[in-house]
Image (spheres, coloured by chain):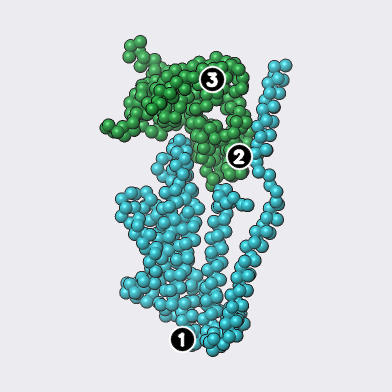
Chain colours: A green, B cyan
Amino acid sequence: MTQTRHAARVADTARAPGAVVLTDVVKRYGRGPGAVTALDGVSLSVEPGSFTCLLGASGCGKSTLLSLVAGLDDISGGSIDHVDQPVAMMFQESALFPWLTVAGNVEIAMRVRGVGRAERRQKAAELLETVRLTGFAHKRPHELSGGMRQRVALARALAQDASVLLMDEPFGALDAMTRDILHDELERIWRERSLTVLFVTHNVREAVRLGDRVVLLSSRPGRVLNVYDVEMDRPRRIDSAPVANLAASITDALREEVSRHAG
Amino acid sequence: MPVEAAKKEKDTSRKWVSGLDELERTPVTETRLGRLGARLWAGTWPKILALVLVIGAWQLLFLSEWKAPWVLPSPLTVWQDLAAYAATPDYLQAIGITLQRALTGFALSVLVGSVLGIAVARFKPLRAAIGSLITGLQTMPSIMWFPLAILLFKISESAILFVVVLGAVPSIANGIISGIDYVPPAWKRVGAVLGMKGLQLYRHVILPATLPSFVSGLKQGWAFAWRSLMAGELLVIVAGQGSVGALMQGAREFNDSARVLTWIITVLVIGILVDSVFRAADNRIRSSWGLNQER
């Protein structure tokens, strides 16, 4: 494929809402001989409505990649194309604002965009219903458990009304049982709303449980090592044999990559 | 049938989610009222004990005849003076004048301190230039400013106000500065993800996040303002203004020890009352933010 034809195809895909196209993305920190290359030529085309998991060991720049897509940081080379501005994003820590109620935390996403009070209130109630926290609208964040706080953070991200949702290890700090439930919940919401999800994790089974595709990144610098299509029916269970089998072979590849860095 | 199956599955997962939510929440063991009563009592008895100890020591000192009774009166004499004097218009008017000065000075300090604090936190060169100066000013006894204040403003309300503001501004500014410095980066990142920029980020994230630190700055600022004011009223006696400090100096000139002690007690009580207001505000913020893990 020639350069121009590739560029034309990229432009076509990127024009669809929900699509994200990364072309030779490079991210360097610092300048001169001391510069560190975090990402080195990452290309990835994400279809609208798909669920993509980015998987890698520490130092693969997976979180950096999300920050770049979100526009929180500038890229050093290549391009990132999507029509959604801004994209929604969620982190490992819920980072809810303690001075606002649960409903207030969801509404803040709309307040910034200038949505009127009545509409905000109604939409926040709907979103809390979606994440099954209807009775907790007037509670303060500290009164909720970790899993509930992550659901509020999810509702806040959904309130951004973007078709792309970036998730940076959103369930990393939760216990296994809560995480299991939230996988089901996220899958349900992703289907109901036809979201495009980019999900960063270092948990291989989690990636296989959730993703349509699992993108394995190398470490220092981050490059795409391999892309696995997960062709299993949904809903999947994290403890099912097919999930475990694929996870095992991805883990092998991951181990090999990590061993490469042994001193 | 598939519709029913889907409905059943939805119902199961709903129950699963809300069951786990229920299990993860900390059960409430005490009633609200019971907790309030216990807290009130826990806060009150040490104060009563302290009062009993102080008055007891005073009475003993009085009984020991260490000083003549007209120099060091008994607690009872002072109590009688206070009870009689508190009903007079002079007493209330003096408190009125002093409190009005305090509030004016404090309000001005809040305004100046907030603007200064935000400016210093926001602009790096400004911080390098006057950041440490502010802390330096905080350690300076405010009474040092009076000679200059009197030269600048003569014996006037302005001289007092000048020193009160100089005393309180550094604490208030420092409260804001440290509050802004310690806003968790995760909150700012959420603000950025939600599309907040510049002023919006300040309005929705940074300023609300500094609230606890701001309130403790206010509390400290009030203490400094009140101290500066008392020093000022003893030194700068504005004609025709029977303020607390002026009347207290008057009592000393008439060798009226009981009256001097009456004023000391009054000032102490006002100080404690105002402090309790700040403390209540602080507690309210802490508990609604989940900062104080109660037992």
- Between B207 and A243, which is closer to the camera in this rendering? A243
The percent position of residue A253, horizontal first and vertical second, equals: 47, 19
Question: Mark 3 or mark 2, which is nearer the start of the sequence?
Answer: 2
The residue that label 2 is drawn on is: A145
Which circle marks residue B253 in the picture? 1
Label 3, label 1: how many angstroms apart (C-alpha)?
90 Å
Query: Residue B114's quadrant in the figure?
Result: bottom left
Identify the residue shown where x is 60% and y is 23%.
A238
Q: Which of the labelled discs sits on residue A247, or is there none?
A: 3
Question: Which residue is nearer to you in this view: A146 or B90?
Answer: A146
Q: Residues within 10 Å of mark 1 (few under 14, many from 20)?
A: few
Amino acid type at circle 2 is Ser
Chain letter of mark 2 equals: A
Residue B65 percent location from the top left of the image: 56, 87
Q: Amino acid at mark 3?
A: Ala
Chain under callout 3: A
